[in-house]
Image: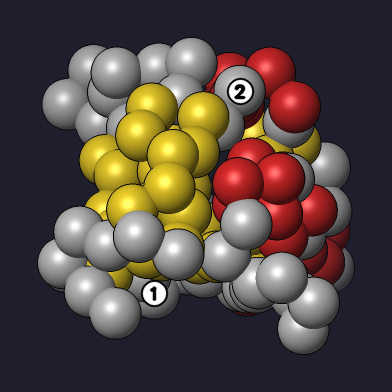
Amino acid sequence: MLPIGGFAIAVALVGITSAFKDAPKTNSGVDTYSFEYQPPATDPYSIANVEDTANWVYNEDASGCGGVDKACALLDVPEDFVDASGTPTLKSSINIVAVLTGANAKVASTASTAIDIENQSN
């Protein structure tokens, strides 16, 4: 009976662990995450709102958005800047810096040059 019980446990563990999808990795093997800007209703593209990490939500399938005029997506964010203890969220150490382009803010830089910044056209 012991070998059958061990086999059942092994099958259960494989099923449980395969349910969790690994985060994408960089060439160096570091986990990366993608975030999409979710503008608030009030003053959606202000510098302060774009720089607020609470307005950026994890998007497992983020593919970017292109353009240059409004904040849109941060792709390939290294795990150093992500709290992945539950649904991934950005840490304040990412230090998003936004600038105005016309009436809308866009992301100009972050604390890491490894992050792929994507802004979108108006």
Please report the residue visible at 51 percent of the width from the left and 29 percent of the height from the top: 97
Amino acid type assigned to the residue bearing label 1 in the image: Asp
Side (left or right) of 21 relative to 53: left
Side (left or right) of 3 relative to 24: right
Q: In which quadrant will I find the C terminus?
A: bottom left
Disc 1: CA contacts within 10 A as few (<14), some (14-19) or many (>=20): few
Amino acid type assigned to the residue bearing label 2 in the image: Asn
Query: Quadrant of the rendered structure where residue 39 is?
Result: bottom right
Q: Secondary structure at mark 2?
A: loop
Q: Is residue 78 visible?
A: no
Please report the residue visible at 65 percent of the width from the left and 34 percent of the height from the top: 82
Residue where numbered disc 2 is placed: 95
Side (left or right) of 74 relative to 81: left
Please report the residue visible at 48 percent of the width from the left and 16 percent of the height from the top: 111
Asked if residue 71 is positioned above or below residue 107 in the image, the reply reads below
Query: Quadrant of the rendered structure where residue 99 is?
Result: top left
Q: Secondary structure at mark 1?
A: loop
Q: Position of residue 67 (x, y in %)?
A: 16, 67
- Earlier in the chain: of badge 1 and badge 2, it is 1
Q: Is residue 85 visible?
A: yes
Q: Tag count in the figure?
A: 2
Q: Position of residue 5 (x, y in %)?
A: 81, 66
Alpha-carbon span between mark 1 and mark 2: 23 Å
Q: Which of the two residues, 73 or 39, is positioned nearer the viewer here?
A: 39
Model colouring: secondary structure
Q: Position of residue 56 (x, y in %)?
A: 64, 58
Question: Marks 2 and 1: in contact by CB < 8 Å?
Answer: no
Q: Which of the two residues, 15 or 47, is positioned nearer the viewer here?
A: 47
Residue where numbered disc 1 is placed: 61
